[in-house]
Every structure is written in C-alpha cells, then in structure tokens.
Image (spheres, grey):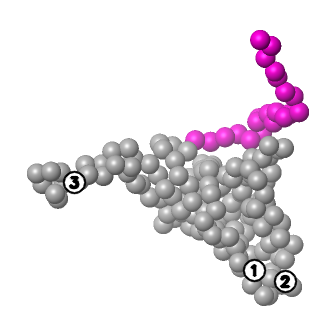
Amino acid sequence: MAIIKGFKLIRWADDGIYYFFCQNGQVEYAPNQKYRIEKKNAYDPTVIHRREAYREDSFDLEAVLEPAEYYSLMSFLLSPGRLYLEYTAYNSINSQFPVTITQLPKCPDDLHEYPTKVKFSLESRYIGSPGYIDFGIIIITDFDETVIPHS
C-alpha cells in the first residue's frame, strides 16, 4: 500500500469543472486486480482459468480540515457529476483515477470549532490504464440548444 502526500479532487458536472485541493492531505492507495470470469479446471481443480481482468483500486484519504473546509468538502462530494482523484506520485508523474465514494467523511464534535483529522474512502474501477484527462482543455457544451431533425 503506497502513501502519497497531497491530492486534488475534480468534479466534472454538466455546468462546469470544479476542484477541491488538499495539500496537507494523505492518500493511501491499495491497487487490486480482479477478473470477471474465474473457472476451475475440470480435470485439475487447483488450476484456475481467469479472463477479462479489471482493476478495483481503493483510496483512503485523510486530511486535517477547518470547519469551513469540511463543509466545502461535503458539498463538493455530494454534488452531481463525475468524480476524479488526482495526485502526484513519488516519481513526479500525475496519476488520475475516476472514483466513486465508498465512505463519506464523518463529522467529529470538535470539527464544529477546531481543525481536526477527517477520513473518507474512494474506489476506482477500470480496465487497462485509467488514462489522464487534461481538464484545462475540456469544453463544456451548452445544453440550451436542441436540435430537431425534419422528416
């Protein structure tokens, strides 16, 4: 399990692209490869045939947040849109994963007044490599236009 310092959450919604930066955060990355099809060999049950591999990686995020930052994070996570996690790995390469929320951050009593540590979990499922999207060049389309074909 790798531990990475600092992360960025990206939410790609219909009305724009939104970011949540956390420089003091920590990411615990646990990669996991699974298979859609797993069958035992008919003649030798100790041999397992596996096909259609996919990745199911888990991320445990931890950050020390002020009360206002916590509420901003909750609003960010609960808003509609596709969620991405981005961080810089030890080899200075930006890694980016499409993620879903598996556990929301809990609000401790002290967080109402003082900064405190908050933990939450994300999961990413993909086939092959997740790739990298440069959100600086994404064009958001206007959904006010409707095209009706004439017959």
Residue denoted by label 2? 112
Q: Are marks 3 and 1 in contact (CB under 8 Å)?
A: no
Magenta region: which residues? 131-151
- Taking the spot 49% from the left edge, 56% from the top edge, the residue there is 56
Could you give the CA–CA distance between mark 1 and mark 2, rounded to whole angstroms?
8 Å
Amino acid on which the number 3 mark rests in the picture: Lys
Answer with the quarter of the image where residue 113 lies: bottom right
Amino acid on which the number 1 mark rests in the picture: Cys
Answer with the quarter of the image where residue 68 lies: bottom right
Residue 27 seen in the figure = no
Amino acid on which the number 2 mark rests in the picture: His
Residue denoted by label 1? 107
As displayed, is residue 105 above or below residue 82?
below
Q: Is residue 32 left or right of residue 50?
A: right
Extreme-top residue of the structure: 151
Could you give the CA–CA distance between mark 3 and mark 1, rounded to whole angstroms?
46 Å
Q: Are marks 1 and 2 in contact (CB under 8 Å)?
A: yes
Q: Nearer the viewer, residue 43 or 27?
A: 43
